[in-house]
Amino acid sequence: MSIKVTFLGTGTSQGVPLIACDCQVCTSSNHKDKRLRSSILVESSSTKIAIDSGPDFRQQLLRERVKMLDAVVFTHEHKDHIAGLDEVRAFNYVNRMRMPVYATNRVQQALKREFAYIFAEEKYPGIPEIDLFEIQDEALQIGTLKLEPINVLHYKLPVKGFKIKQFAYITDANFIPDEQKEKLYNLDVLVLNALRRETHISHFTFDEAIALVNELKPRKAYFTHISHQLGLHDEVNTELPNNIELAFDGLQIII
């Protein structure tokens, strides 16, 4: 069974272009330099899930003409990864289903704070209808997709990456414990965050991400969660080894 991965967004928390910025990246006319907040869509022949739903979720789903969704899976609770949860209302109505939402207990508590109206005892008509399922360390089976959680750190914040067959997605991380790296060696495709060139407290830098790819030795790697500080897409791509590319919004890959 093959899977298709669509990059709904590949940008950092403020997106690219950045509001009020006139740098060469933010003013670029290249569509690959336009980055919405990071999220992916993963599809098998019969199952479709979103990993994260940031502030641009509505725009991303419309752009990709997504007509159905089986679940939303969250990596962590930062606003640029959860803010679009309300948009699942469309699938409640069109697909006549409650939306399964998978998150750690910590992330569930954040969702209940940020979207208190969804979980209120007296519910307002038309609010999103969701069912929460807790992510721990065991594999998740969602339809025909099996997701193996990968525990990483975003500075001190626990974040979940996910491995699906020979594909893995790691966003918002700057540390992966050795026992978790064991799950990531020799993949077909690894997606990894590479924020910028300068040292950052909670994200892999460009050079750190390249070094990690060289260590884990996937057949192919894509970088995501990219800041305008990294540089122009086409120019940065020329610096990368043949097995690494910058992802861009709308990119689709088959594994």
Image (cartoon, rainbow, N blue to C red):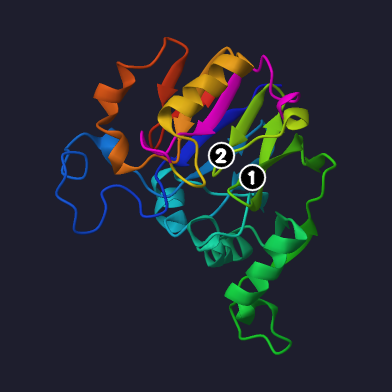
Kindly identify the residue that appears in the image at 21 percent across and 39 percent down.
25
Quarter holding residue 180: top right
Can residue 158 be seen by looking at this rendering? yes
Crowdedness near tag 1: few (<14), some (14–19) or many (≥20) residues, C-alpha within 10 Å: some
Q: Is residue 97 above or below residue 255?
A: below
**Label pair 2/1, CB-CB below 8 angstroms:** yes
Task: Tell which of 65 and 146 is nearer to you.
Answer: 146
- Residue 151, x across and y down, in percent: 72, 41
Mark 2 surroundings within 10 Å by alpha-carbon count, few (fewer than 14), some (14 through 19), many (20 or more): many
Image quarter hosting the C terminus = top right
Q: In this view, does 103 lie above or below 38?
A: below
Q: What element carries label 2?
A: loop
Question: Sequence order check: which comes first, mark 2 or mark 1?
Answer: 1
Q: Is mark 1 on a helix, strand or loop?
A: strand
Residue that lies at the very extreme toward the bottom in this rendered image:
122
- Give left or right: position of 242 versus 158: left
Name the amino acid, label 1.
Answer: Leu
Percent across and percent down for residue 246 are 39, 27
Assign the N terminus to one quadrant of the image: top right
Give the magenta range: 181-199
Residue 96 lies in quadrant: bottom right
- For badge 2, the amino acid type reads Asn
Which numbered tag is attached to residue 174? 2
Q: In this view, does 37 lie to the left or right of 177?
A: left
Comparing 30 with 22, the one in front is: 22
Q: Is residue 121 left or right of residue 203?
A: right
> Is residue 197 one of those drawn in magenta?
yes
Could you tell me which residue is drawn at 41 percent across and 21 percent down? Answer: 245
Q: Mark 1 points at which residue?
A: 153
